[in-house]
């Protein structure tokens, strides 16, 4: 059953995978992946690049797709890695039946397979999807450690913890929340025997070995371990907001949005009540409340972080459905429940269709955060057209912008594309690309060029400066939205 749901989840995630424009974060991850494909060593950047796990998975998938460097990559090859990780997450719920029950895991798998939030970000080349898969892996293997006292389970738990850290440094939040929730749940267990020392040692050794191998890229970059500790003050500062400040209730509003959000959030709240009444599952309720409170209290907020909250919410919603279904065995009650389930499924399908496929990069989509606009997709094709008009076989393109991303991705086919900060000397070029606030500083160089405007993302315009005289007719193109 769970394999069938996972295959359906894969089928939902694959269509039109390369059509949505690449977000800035996706393009940066793509650039790092491209360097690794070309044989560069991995260097952990504690500033804001996260760990190596996503790049390791992406390089494996991209090589199978035939890519050997940055210029050979495409959107489908990159996003396929997170699609596979999201599909694996759906499949993992089948391993949670012994812990959470069949109906809760079935509902959680269905929600992860078809709900708009997981489908949208599983098609996004960022770290969050793999992180959530590793988190679920830690929950399941950690429970088996307490139940079976197995060294093998402890090793798997250590591996999942290392994989979480190698995805994102926010792993410390989840390990803390899971540890505290497990301790509280343990107090309510009838048999509270702590695993022996060899179990803890197996988990710790596996965690250390896996983390070292990943962060040092198989022993090629040992300074990464020191850099990992330097990441702590960087991410502590970033938690303050740095332009991404949102109110405390941001995630609650995001999860409750759309046609289906309120229904799922209500079911999850009901599931907390059910979980609290079950000593075996009380840790899930505590963990959910803890991560929700921590993420809501941190000023820095982005919508993809809500995927971390969706994981326990989906299981809790399944708890509520199981409670209602088993508690009301009469035919009339279950018939009514089936009608309500069908209604929620319709609402979910509407939200998924709209947010994932109809308006994936639109400003009105709450998941499309500071997203690259579809207008930017015209830029590479226009450059190709202009190079042919000017009979330039290998054009020199000078990009002058304080933040040029995701242009390195869209210019990856042009071998002589260079990037400069405003005020730096670029030298001569066949084409220039600037933002509106720096073009005046290049007046002398641009006097024989004519502008065309492209929307990069909300409230950000890029100007393509092309030679004023071409072999074909050319007029200045006004900015989008102007006659």
Image (spheres, rainbow, N blue to C red):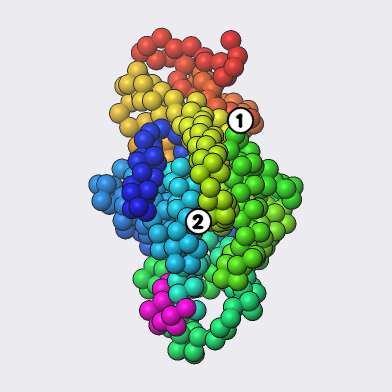
Would residue 195 be found to the left or right of residue 90 on screen?
A: right
Q: Classify residue 461 by image quadrant.
A: top right
The spot of residue 170 in percent (x, y) is 58, 62
Q: Relative to 354, does residue 5 appear above or below in the rendering?
A: below
Query: In this orientation, does residue 51 appear?
Result: no
Q: Which residue is rendered at x = 27% and y = 47% of the image? A: 65
Query: What is the span of residues highlighted in magenta in the rendered image?
Result: 147-160
Q: Mark 2 points at which residue?
A: 104
In the picture, the quarter occupied by the C terminus is top right
Q: Residue 445 carries which label?
A: none
Cα separation, mark 1 vs mark 2, equals 32 Å
Taking depth in this image into account, of 219 and 92 the one nearest to the observer is 92
Q: Which residue is rendered at x = 68% and y = 43% of the image? A: 253
The spot of residue 180 in percent (x, y) is 64, 73
Query: In this orientation, does residue 13 appear?
Result: yes
Taking depth in this image into account, of 142 and 480 the one nearest to the observer is 142
Magenta segment main secondary structure = helix
Would residue 401 be found to the left or right of residue 148 on screen?
A: right
Q: Classify residue 148 by image quadrant.
A: bottom left
Q: Residues within 10 Å of mark 1 (few under 14, many from 20)?
A: few
Q: Which residue is rendered at x = 63% and y = 38% of the image? A: 257
Q: Mark 1 points at which residue?
A: 364
Q: Relative to 399, does residue 392 appear above or below in the rendering?
A: above
Q: Which residue is rendered at x = 64% and y = 41% of the image? A: 262
Taking depth in this image into account, of 391 and 252 the one nearest to the observer is 252
Instruction: Please give the count of numbered marks on the rendered protein.
Output: 2
């Amino acid at each position: 059953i769970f394999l069938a749901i996972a295959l359906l989840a894969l089928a939902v995630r694959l269509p039109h995978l390369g059509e949505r424009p690449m977000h800035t974060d996706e393009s940066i991850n793509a650039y790092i992946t491209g360097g690794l494909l070309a044989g560069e060593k991995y260097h952990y950047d504690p500033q804001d690049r996260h760990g190596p796990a996503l790049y390791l998975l992406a390089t494996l998938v991209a090589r199978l797709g035939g890519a050997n460097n940055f210029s050979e990559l495409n959107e489908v090859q990159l996003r396929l890695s997170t699609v596979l990780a999201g599909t694996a997450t759906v499949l993992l719920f089948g391993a949670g039946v012994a812990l959470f029950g069949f109906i809760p895991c079935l509902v959680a798998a269905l929600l992860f397979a078809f709900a708009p939030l997981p489908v949208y970000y599983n098609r996004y080349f960022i770290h969050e999807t793999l992180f959530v898969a590793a988190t679920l892996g830690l929950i399941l293997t950690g429970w088996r450690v307490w139940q079976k006292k197995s060294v093998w389970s402890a090793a798997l738990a250590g591996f999942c913890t290392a994989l979480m850290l190698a995805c994102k440094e926010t792993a410390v939040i989840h390990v803390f929340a899971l540890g505290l929730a497990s301790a509280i749940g343990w107090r309510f267990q009838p048999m509270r025997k702590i695993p022996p020392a060899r179990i803890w040692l197996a988990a710790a050794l596996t965690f250390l070995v896996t983390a070292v191998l990943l962060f040092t890229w198989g022993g090629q970059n040992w300074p990464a371990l020191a850099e990992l500790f330097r990441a702590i003050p960087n991410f502590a500062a970033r938690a303050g907001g740095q332009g991404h400040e949102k109110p405390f209730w941001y995630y609650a509003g995001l999860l409750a949005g759309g046609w289906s959000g309120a229904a799922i959030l209500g079911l999850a709240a009901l599931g907390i009540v059910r979980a609290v009444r079950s000593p075996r599952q009380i840790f899930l309720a505590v963990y959910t409340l803890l991560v929700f409170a921590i993420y809501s209290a941190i000023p820095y907020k982005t919508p993809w972080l809500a995927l971390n909250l969706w994981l326990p919410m989906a299981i809790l919603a399944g708890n509520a459905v199981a409670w209602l279904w088993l508690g009301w065995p009469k035919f009339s009650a279950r018939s009514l429940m089936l009608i309500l389930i069908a209604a929620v499924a319709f609402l979910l399908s509407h939200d998924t269709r709209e947010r994932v496929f109809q308006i994936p990069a639109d400003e009105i989509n709450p998941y499309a955060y500071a997203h690259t606009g579809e207008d930017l997709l015209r830029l590479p094709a226009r450059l190709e057209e202009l190079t042919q008009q000017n009979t330039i076989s290998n054009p020199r393109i000078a990009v002058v912008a304080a933040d040029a991303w995701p242009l390195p991705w869209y210019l990856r086919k042009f071998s002589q594309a260079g990037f400069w900060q405003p005020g730096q000397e670029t030298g001569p070029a066949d084409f220039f690309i600037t933002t509106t606030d720096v073009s005046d500083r290049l007046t002398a160089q641009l006097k024989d060029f004519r502008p065309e405007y492209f929307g990069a993302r909300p409230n950000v315009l890029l100007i393509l400066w092309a030679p004023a005289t071409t072999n074909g007719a050319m007029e200045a193109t006004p900015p989008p939205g102007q006659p």
